[in-house]
Each structure stands twice: as structure tokens, then as C-alpha cells.
Amino acid sequence: MLFHSSLRKELARSFGATLVVLVTIVMTMTLIRTLSQASRGSVNPQEVMMVMGYTVLGYLPPILTLSLFIAIVGTLSRMYRDSEMAIWFSAGRGLSAFLKPLFGFAWPVLLVIALLALVVWPWANQQTQDLKDRYGSRGDLERVAPGQFQESSNGTRVFFLDKDTPDNKSGKNIFISTLERGKETVTSARSGRVVTEGDRQFLLLSNGQRMESSLKDRQLKVSEFEELGNRVGTVPLGSSDTTPVKTRSTFALLMDPSRANQAELAWRLGLALAAFNFVVIAVTVSSVNPRAGRSGNLVFALFAFIVYFNLLNIGQSWVGGGRVGFVGFVLALHGGVLLAALLWLAKQHNNWPLWPRRPLTRRSAP
């Protein structure tokens, strides 16, 4: 009991401190990226915190995995450095005896990682996508900020106007530049208002001028008008036939075993299996020489973490491209890593040499 309790207390302190640091770093990076998206018009500036929250929630599985991995490696490395391992070994506790208390501490974290990867990850992506689609499908007149040039939703028009009405249904000093069907059109008007007919929107311009030029023969046509209607319709929500794979639920992926769905399912399931394997890997890579520093051990552990997740990303692309099967990839990567970690742990536990030792031979005197 003393062995288990002392180990769990130190693991809890190390895991909590590492998790706070990693979450702070990820939130800072996500905030910078979300603000960049808001400045480009992809995200509503008023919903920056919501988008950042959903994004960080989707990043929690690898964050928790890395926090647990660093906590185990750091705790066991300190025990090697302070010669506590020699005390436990002399008391009859081998290296494999650490697996039971480690999994006793890690099983709630592993369960949370599995739930986040299989349930929360697609839900958070769906919420983020809905926020972006809702903001991207707003009307072109609503899209324009006063005194700024802004593209339309389909990217074929550039708008500029001064809005001074509270309902955002009218504006003054309007400028519209359109490029479509081989013609470039520049329209300017003193005022305009939005008229909705069904699911279409029109901008009725008043007292303006229209200049149309052909890109092929460079013919120029200039006309003046008292009133002109210009289509500025929106794309209704849910009009897209293709739903991003990362926003589909895990049950939907299982019901439709296409290549893209199997690739996404391999990624989600791999997050949970990788977290389990990292507990075993942490025991094997934490062995250090008490006389040497433990920085090299932590660097190797982080390198192993990066390589593992890169293989997970590569395998996702391979499953999506049909180069490998879903079951074969999961067994080869996660099963192979678990088998290699267990063999390495058995080698350290039983002190097996990597190479067979040669017997010493005595040389006869001349």
C-alpha cells in the first residue's frame, strides 16, 4: 500500500502541473489562430471565445495523453535519480510491478481520453463548423463592415458601402466590383436597400453609374441609372451536400464504412489505444543512470511521442487512400507498439542482455 500510495501522489502532482502548462500553451496558440481567422472574415469576432473553446476541447485527447506520459516518465526518472528504485528493487518489487499502480492511476484519464476522442471530438468539430457556416452564410450587405472592402460569399464581388442604419438593410455611397462571365463591372450608387424575395436577396441601388468592360475585346460600356437591382443572395445553411468527415459521429462512421470514414475512425480509435500504449512505453523509457542527468531521457520520450502520433497521421492518410486496411493498420501500429514495449519491459525486468555474452577464455602461457 505504501508503494502504491506514494507513487500515485507524485503522479497526481506531476500530471496536474503538466496539464495546466500544456493547456495554457494550446489555448494561447488557438487564440492567436482564431483571431487570425476572425480578421480574415472566416469567424465571427463575437464568437471567438466559443470557437476557441470548441477547438481546445477537440485537442484535449493528445494533451491528456502527453501530460500522462510526461508525468510517468518524470516521476520514474526522479526515482531512478534519487536511488528510490534501488530500494524498491531490493524489496522485491520488479519493474513490471509498476504497471499495476500506474494503470490504477491512469484508468480514469484513459477513459476520459476515449470519450473525448470518440464522442466529444466530432461534436466539437460540428459546433465549430456550424458557427463558421452560420457566419459565412450571412447576407453580402451584412458581411460588409462600414468603410472596408469585403468580398461576397461566392468570391466574385467586392463591396464597399457606408452603413448608418440600425437594421443593416440600407446603406449609402455604395461601390460594387464584379468579375464573372468574362466581364468586369463596376457599379457605384449614392444609396441602396436590401429587398428579400423568397430565399433570394437583391440590393436595389438608386442614383448611380454602371461601367462594364469585356476582358476579351476591351469594349467599355458606361450607363447611368435611377434604380438598379443587383443579386446579393446568400447560401442557406445546410445547402452543402458534403459533410466533413471529422464532424460525423462515431456511430455514423461505423454504419458507413467508406475509406474516408474508416480513416477518421482509425484516428479516433488510435488516440485511445495510443494513450494506453504510452503508459507501458513510459515505464520502459524512464530507466536512467543515477549518475547522469535525465534530460536525455525526457528528450527521447518526447521523440517517441512525436513519432507515434506522426505514424498515426500517416496511417490515417493510408487508410483513406486505400493503401492499407483499417484492421491491418490498427493491429500493425498499436499492436506492434504494445508488443515491442512489453518485450522491452521484460528485457529490463529480467535484465536480459541485448547480445549474448561470449565466455572468457584464458590464454595459455608460452
Image (spheres, helix red, strand yellow):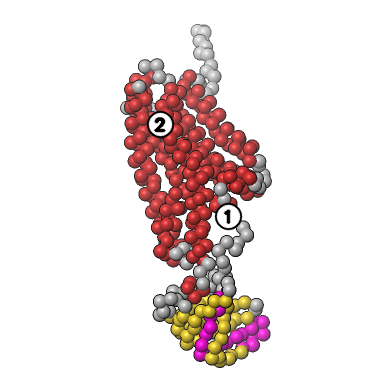
Of residue 60 and residue 225, the one placed in the foreground of this image is 225
From the viewer's perspective, is residue 33 above or below residue 217? above
Report which residue position mark 2 lands on. Answer: 105
Q: Quadrant of the N terminus?
A: top left
Crowd tier of the residue under label 1, counting other residues whose Cα lies within 10 Å: few below 14, some 14–19, many 20 or above: few
* Residue plotted at (57% across, 83% down): 229
The residue sitting at 50% across, 7% down in the picture is: 365
Kind of residue sitting beneath label 2? Phe
Percent position of residue 153, x then y: 54, 70
Q: Residues within 10 Å of mark 2 (few under 14, many from 20)?
A: some
In the image, taking residue 240 as reference, residue 69 lies left or right, namely left
Depicted 154 relative to depicted 207: above or below: above
Task: Tell me which label, 1 or 2, sits earlier in the chain.
Answer: 2
Q: Residue most toward the front?
A: 198
Three-letter amino acid code at disc 1?
Pro
Q: Is residue 197 magenta?
A: no
Q: How many marks?
A: 2
Query: What separation in Å lies between label 1 and label 2 (alpha carbons)?
Result: 36 Å
In magenta segment, residue 208: yes
Magenta region? 200-220
Front residue of 341 and 50? 50
The structure residue drawn at horizontal position 52% and vertical position 18%, both measured from the top left corner, is 357
Q: Please tell me which residue is depicted at 60% across the width and 63% down the height of the picture.
A: 239
Judging depth in this view, the residue of 80 and 178 nearest the camera is 178
Q: Main secondary structure of the magenta part?
A: strand
Return the mark for residue 136.
none
Instruction: Give how far across and how far down residue 136 sits, in percent.
Output: 51, 66
Residue matched to label 1: 244
Residue 98, visible in the rendered structure: yes
Residue nearest the viewer, comparing 20 with 364: 20
